[in-house]
Amino acid sequence: MTSESFNDQTLSRKAMKAELLDAETELQLAYAWRDHRDEAALHRLITAYMRLAISMAAKFKRYGAPMGDLIQEAGLGLMKAADKFDPDRGVRFSTYAVWWIKASIQDYVMRNWSMVRTGSTSSQKSLFFNMRRVQARLEREAAAEGRVLERHVLHAAIAEEIGVPLADVEMMEGRLSGSDFSLNATQSSEDEGREWIDTLEDEGEHGAVLVEGRMDNAQLREWLLVALTSLNDRERFIVRERKLRDETRTLESLGQELGLSKERVRQLEAAAFVKMRKSLEAQSREVQQFLA
């Protein structure tokens, strides 16, 4: 079993076992995060709707992106939704989150579909995900009437149907019809010909190392979030201010705010790290037992 498939299956199992939130509980968690930045409430809200993110990620597998990356992007969209959700608007969080999840996945697919950036404007994004479908329908309708649509007529019809400029349709047609040139192609027709990639100097890490690093970082973020929930509010506040801020605070400044001595803050910080270390070790053992 590859590490990618293991991570995918682990996330899916956790998502399916997560609680189903009723509207009242969901609202309470949303208020707790918005008004008090309660990280435990945020974790519970995100965990409950991770199954939604995974379900939406699966719909984009046909674009050739790794499922693990799609799930990660869906999770990022879910977290953005939680951060920006306004419970006072009277809509369910799942309804609001769908748009953020979809936008996050679509942005990722467009960034990685080709080494050449496919587009970033709203019209280009609409074309990327809808152009082939609309084109196929228009061609079927024309064929049923015994007509053949010329290229410029077809492009104009697509532009009108999707509501985008004709120039964007022509640009997207060129990008979607071509494929990236492989650097592993040989420079000559001979079997032993040198590959184009051999002419490039590789000064960076190999792709496999980068992919493994991204997967490890994603897993570590998940473990750390779980570890943070093992702390009480004061411990979590100290850890966040001491280690998770761009500009970390001193023990003395935290002591003044909390009404504690500098030494007491240091003791609480040390105790929090012990709790987090135990949580991380427990999660690591769980993974090792699964792989055994």
Image (spheres, grey):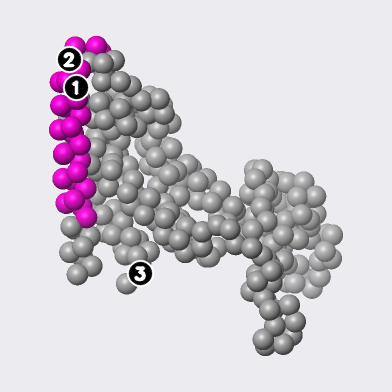
Where the N terminus falls, by quadrant?
bottom left
Q: Residue at x 17, y 14 (%)?
A: 260
Classify 10 Å Cα crowding around label 3: few (below 14), some (14-19), many (20 and above).
few
Task: For the residues labelled 1 and 2, say whether their Cβ atoms are less than 8 Å apart.
Answer: yes
Q: Earlier in the sequence, mark 3 or mark 1?
A: 3
Number of the front mark, 3 or 2: 2
Residue placed under numbered mark 3 in the picture: 2
Is 60 above or below relative to 120? Answer: below
Cα separation, mark 3 vs mark 2, equals 49 Å
Closer to us: 60 or 131: 60
* Range drawn in magenta: 256-284
Element at label 3: loop
Residue placed under numbered mark 1 in the picture: 265
Is 101 above or below relative to 243? Answer: below
Q: Residue at x 63, y 59 (%)?
A: 114
Task: For the residues labelled 3 and 2, say whether their Cβ atoms are less than 8 Å apart.
Answer: no
Q: Residue at x 43, y 44 (%)?
A: 76
What number is the disc on residue 260?
A: 2
What number is the disc on residue 9?
A: none
Side of 105 where 42 appears, left or right: left
Side of 140 where 102 appears, left or right: left
